[in-house]
Image (cartoon, helix red, strand yellow):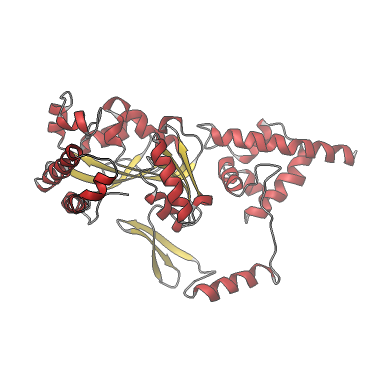
Amino acid sequence: MTRGRYLRMLAEVPAFHRAARRLQAESGDDALTLDEFLIRGRFSAYFVAHFVTPLVAAVWSCDAATARRAPARYLFRFLAHRGLLSVTGSPVWRTVTGGSRSYVDRVVKQLGAVHTATPVRSVRRHADGVELTTEDGLTTAYDSVVNSGTSLLEIGTGWGELAIRAVRRGARVTTLTLSAEQRDLARERTRTAGAADRVSVELCDYREARGTYDAVVSVEMVEAVGVEFWPVYFRTPDERLAPGGRAALQAITMPHDRMLASRGTFTWIHKYIFPGGQLPSVEAIEETVRDRAGLCTARRDGFGAHYAETLRLWRERFTERADEVEGLGFDDTFRRMWTFYLAYSEAGFRAGYLDVQQYLFTKDGPRGGSATVPRPGGGGR
């Protein structure tokens, strides 16, 4: 009888993996507990006791009863990132002579100023990061969005620089683009940077994104998607974020009254630079997020004057390297147009007609207005 139950358990393992991967790919069910998942899947008590419980004990420092009350997605996301939701392709796990304490001691010796086994008193988020204060009063600053082990979705790849920097901070990144040229160059750059194993560059529309992530970032994408798609654009981070997740968005904005007055016009920018694009206003962004997505606006930082300087530097470097640009196949007409575009945009920021915002949205938390803090910075990825 024991042998029969054991053989059934072996048959249930791939079924468990498939069901877990389906749950990860679906939207909703964020509150589904591991216990509810197991009941819904009709997994046997023997399988739960001899496969699931040891698996959970290996990755979570809590008793089985507590683990089974936790959201199933949290466990499955952890397992998926480590190749443990498949019978094949799992990593080889090795133990360290002397146990984990010996391993930790070696790491601390190599890295230097590392604090271990220290109770945390508080965590405070602010404009430049996260401050963690321990029980002995020591306060240390950390990155605000990307921390070690974070699964990060980037909507709009650019040329791959943001993804590479996120990997250097410990993240595993999935980045989406509709441009085959961007995809190919981003893949080349991630390989050169030694980050290819932690960055997946996908040719995919953001509306078709799947999976659940700890954080979502998107830099100057909202301006290009079109007004009619703003609701689905902002719903995408909400649908892809795990509970407690955070999304960072950078957007160029214009005054609300000018946005409304110019929304139906066809300008030089539309004709030559951004067909179908529309700059949003702060009011439009926050209204869309409030009414059409489940995100909470936690913070907004504006730095338009600094963006003007960024554009000046771009324009000067572009004109200084005109011969290289010509060598890439761009003629004098294009070079004049692009120089005019950069100068035109710089003037808009210097006059205060244009601004650039960085938003921080949270998946859960109190709703309300955003805090606005001017900060230095510059554009580009």
Q: Position of residue 35 (x, y in %)?
A: 65, 39
Q: Say whether residue 215 is visible.
A: no
**Residue 353 sits above or below residue 142 on the image:** above
Query: Residue at left 68%, top 53%?
Result: 57
Visible residue check, residue 230: yes
What residue sits 22% from the left and 49% below the top?
323
Image location (x, y in percent) of residue 123: 40, 59
Q: In the picture, residue 21 is in which quadrant?
A: top right
Q: Residue furthest right?
A: 1
Q: Residue furthest left?
A: 351
In-image side of 251 versus 362 (left or right)? left
**Residue 322 on image: x %, y %:** 21, 49
* Residue 301 relative to residue 80: left or right: left
Instruction: Give the left or right position of residue 19, taking residue 31 as reference.
Output: right
Q: Quadrant of residue 72?
A: top right
Q: Which residue is found at the position 67% from the left and 54% from the top? A: 58
Image coords of residue 38 (percent x, y)? 67, 36
**Is residue 137 shown above or below 68?**
below
Image position of 326 (left or right of 194)? left
State the residue in front, 263 or 318. 318
Report the quarter where the N terminus lies: top right
Front residue (pair 107, 341): 341
Q: Which of 294 and 334 is in front in this view?
A: 334
Of 364 and 177, nearer the camera is 177
For the image, the number of numbered tags is 0
Query: Residue at position x 75%, y 36% from top?
Result: 12
